[in-house]
Each structure stands twice: as structure tokens, then as C-alpha cells.
Image (cartoon, rainbow, N blue to C red):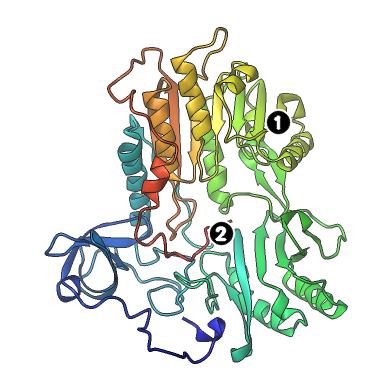
Amino acid sequence: MSTEQQGGGKGRGRHRRDRNAGPAPGVSDNEWLKVTGIDLDAQGIAHNSEGVVVFIDGALPGEEARVKVIKRKKQWEKADLVAIRRESSQRVTPRCPHFGLHAGACGGCKMQHLAPQAQVAMKQRVLEDNLWHLGKARPELVLRPIEGPPWGYRLRARLSVRWVAKKNTVLVGFHERKSSYVADMRECHVIPRRISDMLMPLRALIEAMQARERLPQIELAIGDQVTALVLRNLEPLSEHDAGLLRAFGKQHDVQWWLQPKGPDTIHRLDDDGGPELAYTLPEFGVRMPFRPTDFTQVNHQINTVLVGRALRLLDVRKDETVIDWFCGLGNFTLPLATMARTVLGIEGSQTLVDRALDNAKLNGLDAHTRFDARNLFEITADDLVALGTVDKWLVDPPREGAFALAKALADLKAAPREGWTAPERIVYVSCNPATLARDAGLLVHQAGYRLVSAGAVNMFPHTAHVESMAVFEWDPQWKPTERTAVVIAEDSALAESESSPGAEEEGDAPPP
């Protein structure tokens, strides 16, 4: 860990034990442990001779490991890998020199030491395990995972910037592993090569700026034609600094934006026209302009495949009506509008709703779309009835999931309303397998649906993030089972999903 970033000085008063020393050696420190599994944080799972679970950073299933325990609880221990006696066939050499368990290692990736195909298999298993253990639901069909190139895929990133006075240098990159300090990144293999090659020039640029101590972040957003960099500036830039940005932008073909306060304050450094930031969905003839701080998928290639599969699974016909819940800018809404009679996109932000409507007009789809802003975490059965009967739903919530929607469907199953019928099919796109499993439990055991298929989407290779997709169909033959009476609490899945011993210490921010 970089002491220069911490600051501070010599300690005073009584001697304090090194916080990184860990607990006194115990049973696990003196045994070869057989690793039998791996969790979503890429920690190997083993048991010592006393039956205590040991989570081992860097260890893979099938390996025999010596460890140093760094945290000990009654039922589990957390340890660092010290040595391997038998190496897994799935272990590979990490491509990036900044990846690893060493001090100062980058925290942007967790799984570069695990073969990409094994990463996908692990994420698929995590999805299935969550569905069963948290939701007591099993898909009738496991979909083939969606995957793509494992390198250079990340077209969005939030890079921290730090001027380190004691080293007389600037750092630009992700956080160090399990730390809030910025890694000394000189290359990155999950962002495009052109952007990786720009890391050192960016450091030199910031170092030359007068406001270098007041520039904490650079956000990257790449579209089909434009590369945008959003500089978080805590004070107005001088003409000197603005001139440096312009010269850099011209040399490296990037479009500079400034963000003096919140995301709504972003603006172009120079609004001199030129192409706008946008991505396309060629299968549907849709073009999606966006601002660099808008939510768009990090991996455009996977997003293109994801949208296509979701719409084929939803199987929308020309005479059908659809609701796209959590519609954002219209990533699913507009492709759906090319297939359905009408699509209603519902989003929590009025700003995003307005932008989605603009995108619909741009693509000539406004006659087939409507948009509405409302709090989707407080949707009730009355709200669903007021919206009327529709044929199908597409649900694409944030990590919190769509509990209110699932509960409203369950309430309407328990107390049907005259004239309203449930959607016959739901495609649920998830970025958190725990909340998907929680909501699947409600849909399957209380709302009258079958879980017909589910599969993983490897949107973020080499990271712990699991995207997935599940398909639910209305079952007219549905009958209550012994599990129907079980109340599935809103936060139960979240509590269990966050119980990993590493979760409370992890300092790496999720992708934007």
C-alpha cells in the first residue's frame, strides 16, 4: 500500500500492532489445505482439519495451498495464498502486470488467473445456485451463456486521479486491490488498447495542469465514433489548463467534457459541433445518442447480443403491447418498438424519460412508444391495474432488483382484479443474481409463473460481476405448493449475497 498516498507521520504513544500482520498463526497456517470451490469474489474455498471454512485469495479449485490467515472468525477464516503444491489446470498466467496479490495491485479485475471459459462456467453456477438456494427455483432450460472477447471490451470506466506530492507524480487508474488508494497503472487490458496507451500521457497532462490537485476523476465513455473523457474539476479551469486539454484532445482524438459538480453539470469543453456520442443496434436499425455520464452498458458487443436474445425470448408479435420496466434511454424500448404494436417505457428519472422520448423521435419510433416516470421501487398492485393489461414485460432493473413489481404480481394473483390479466411472458435482465433469485421466488411460488429458462451473460470478463437473463411464463395450471406460503422478505437475498467475508473489506468500485 502506498504510504505516500496516506500521508501522516510517525506514530506516538503506546506501540500498536501492525494492522496488516493478521491474527496469530493457527491451524490453517500450518496445513496444506485442499481447495474444493470458489466464490464470486474469486476466493478459493477450503476447510481446515477442524472443519473451519477458509476463504483463500488467489487459490483455485483442485489446488492444495499453504496460506497466511489475515482474518479469523468463529465459523470462517480469510487467508492469503502463500504457496501451491498442486496447480489447477484452469490456472493461467495473468496478462496484466498490475493484476495479483502483491502490494499495490490493481483492483479492477479479480479473475485474470482463471481461464476465461472457467470464469463463465463459475458465473453460470453462481446464477443457478442463487436461484435455487435463495429463490427455490430451477430453470427448465439453462441458456447457453452469452460471452465475447475477454480483452479490450470495456468502453466505459471511471478512473481516479491523484497528485502524489511526495513522489512528485500523478496516478490515473482504478483503485488498488481492497483499498481506496489509486493503483500505479501503466497499462490496462480490459479497456481498448488505444485508451491503455493513453494512460501515461494522461498522467503527464494532469501533472502539467495548474489545477492538478483539484482534478479527482476522469470518466471514459466510448461510442461508435467518439471517445469522450469527462474531467471532474473542483474549481474552474484556467486558460492555461483548458489549452492543455484542447491540445491533448486534438493529439489523441478525444472529446473533453467538464463536470464541476454533479452529473447534471457536465458540458463540453468546446461545443464546436462534430459527431455526437452514440451507439447503434444494427439488428434493429436503432441509433442511441447518449451523454458520457448516462448509464449505458460497459460492453457494447455483449449488449448487442443481449438485446437480440432478450427480444427473441420475449417473442413479441406485431399486435402485442409491452412494458419495458427500468427503460433508461430506451436500450430495449426502441428495438421492441420495431416489433410490437406499442411499448410503454417506464423509468424512475424524468430526465432519462425525456431523453428516451428524444431517441424514439430520432429513430422514427415515437408513434409506437410512450414513456412515463415513476418510482419503480414503490409500484403496487393498484398501479399495475391502472396501467391496464399488457401482453408482455421486459424488466431490466439495477442491482436492487424488481421486488415491488414481483410482489405486485403476487398480490394480484392472491386477489385478482376483474378485467386485468397478468403478462403472459416476462424477460428479466439482471445485474445481481441474488436479487433476481429473490424476485424469481416470488414469481414462481406466489405469482403464478414458471421459470422456463435462465442463463449467464459475461458482460464483465475477469471481474466478479454477473449479468444474467431469465424467462418467466404465466402458468394457467399453476397451483399453490408448500413453498407458496413462505414469505420471501425483501432483503433476505441481499443479506445472504453480501455475507462473503471479503465483501465488507472490498474497496473496488463496480463498473459505472
Query: Is 442 displayed left or right of 254 in the figure?
Result: left
Q: Secondary structure at mark 1?
A: strand
Q: Secondary structure at mark 2?
A: loop
Q: Nearer the viewer, residue 139 or 382?
A: 382
Image point (44%, 64%), residue name: 506
Q: Is residue 271 above or below residue 407?
A: below
Hey, which quadrant is residue 462 in on the image?
A: bottom left
Marked residue nearer the N-terminal end (2 or 1): 2
Query: Is 484 displayed left or right of 47 in the figure?
Result: right
Q: Nearer the viewer, residue 137 or 201?
A: 137
Q: Are marks 2 and 1 in contact (CB under 8 Å)?
A: no
Query: Is 281 displayed left or right of 271 in the figure?
Result: left
Q: Residue furthest front?
A: 13
> How far is disc 2 from disc 1 in space, using C-alphas?
31 Å
Residue ID for mark 2: 154
Q: Nearer the viewer, residue 229 or 149?
A: 229
Residue ID for mark 1: 372
- Residue 383 image point, x, y percent: 61, 22
Image point (74%, 30%), residue name: 365
Hey, which quadrant is residue 413 in on the image?
A: top left
Query: Is 126 displayed left or right of 368 in the figure?
Result: left
For the C terminus, give its image quadrant. Answer: bottom right
Callout 1, which amino acid?
Answer: Asp
Hey, which quadrant is residue 6 in on the image?
A: bottom right
- Residue 91 image point, x, y percent: 30, 66
Label 2 CA crowd tier, 10 Å (few <14, some 14–19, many 20+):
many
Q: Residue furthest left?
A: 49
